[in-house]
Amino acid sequence: MFPSEFDYERAGSVEEAVDLLATHGENQVEILAGGHSLLPTMKSGLANPDVVIDIGELDDLRGVDRHDDIVEIGALTDYSTVAGDDTLGDAIPAVTQAAQAIGDVQVRNRGTVGGNLAHADPASDLPAAALAAEATLHAEGPDGHRTIPVDDFFTGLYGTDLVEGELLTAIEMPGHDIGTYVKKPSPSSGYAMVGVAAVFELADGIVESARVAATGAIDHAKRLTAVEEGLVGTALDEDAIASAAPQATDGIETFELMDDNQASAEYRSTLLEVYTEQALTAAADHTGTAIH
């Protein structure tokens, strides 16, 4: 299928992109970054923008910087850069593993981290990893710069805390030694039927803090707080994992679970517990308390 007609604008800077968003504020406007989320929806008729603003040439939004214990990823950085960088793999393993799990080589070479998070697909991999990694998102808009804690960012089905006229520019996250991401991919699309990311801080072998998040289960990425609370103060061993993993569905009502031709709500509930256990077990392997 072909998309409906639209006007095309190419931004030469972040400031120009924000100005263009304001200029076309009364129209249906979409931002074009890597295009792997927007173009399929336009071709299928699910998105019919009046104006498309192309930010693909804003090189200052592309790249990775690490200063002290903070990693900053530009919004236009492609998945391959995050997935293939060994330094990033050491600093933010949950995020690099999530990037490695996305699509295929062609998608990873073109899709962008910022586009992925701003699109907030309920079955996308990076939102769960960003939640677990305690990311901070940076946006520019008509009122200037704004920082958004990741816990406030995902608001519902394809919904985020970005307001009209704002552009996501960068993602910051603290480094973490222990982090992992695992998923059950859809056999047809590769998207997550359920995916789970887990990040831990340990002191003397005991979990000091835990952030565990899931994607694909409900209409947006969500932290599994009951699992987190069950792990703090433990040695992340077999007993702790066996006790915590079944709490993955705590606080999630049955009607909230995704139910479609890929998987029923009941099946997703089971997957959520299973893949939470897998993520925790993979993390335990990295602590030296490997479970066999």
Image (spheres, rainbow, N blue to C red):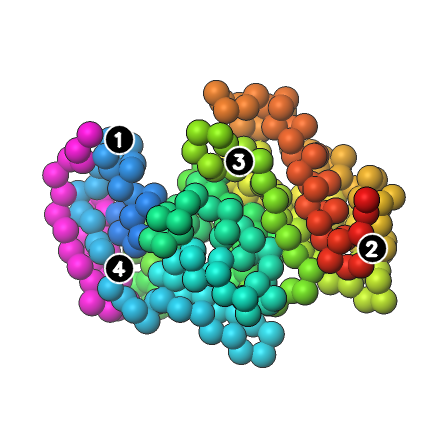
Q: CA distance from mark 4 to mark 2?
A: 44 Å
Q: CA distance from mark 3 to mark 2?
A: 27 Å
CB atoms of marks 4 and 2 within 8 Å:
no
| First along the sequence among labels 3 and 1 | 1
Graded by Cα atoms within 10 Å as few (under 14), some (14 to 19) or many (20 or more), the crowding at tag 3 reads some
Residue bounds of the magenta highlight: 1-29
The vertical placement of 246 against 254, above or below, is below
Q: Residue at x 48, y 42 (%)?
A: 124
Q: Quadrant of residue 251?
A: top right
Residue furthest to the bottom in view is 68
Question: On the image, numbered disc 4 is attached to which residue?
Answer: 56
User: Does 16 appear in magenta?
Assistant: yes
Residue 86 — which label? Answer: none
Where is residue 283 shown, x and y percent of the image?
72, 53
Q: Quadrant of the N terminus?
A: top left
Where is residue 110 shown, x and y percent of the image?
33, 53
Graded by Cα atoms within 10 Å as few (under 14), some (14 to 19) or many (20 or more), the crowding at tag 4 reads some
Q: CA distance from mark 4 to mark 3?
A: 28 Å
Regarding mark 4 in the picture, which secondary structure is present there? loop
Q: CA distance from mark 1 to mark 4?
A: 22 Å
Question: On the image, numbered disc 3 is attached to which residue?
Answer: 185
Question: On the image, numbered disc 1 is attached to which residue?
Answer: 44
Q: Which amino acid type is shown beneath numbered disc 1?
A: Ser
User: Does 3 appear in magenta?
Assistant: yes
Question: On the image, numbered disc 2 is attached to which residue?
Answer: 289
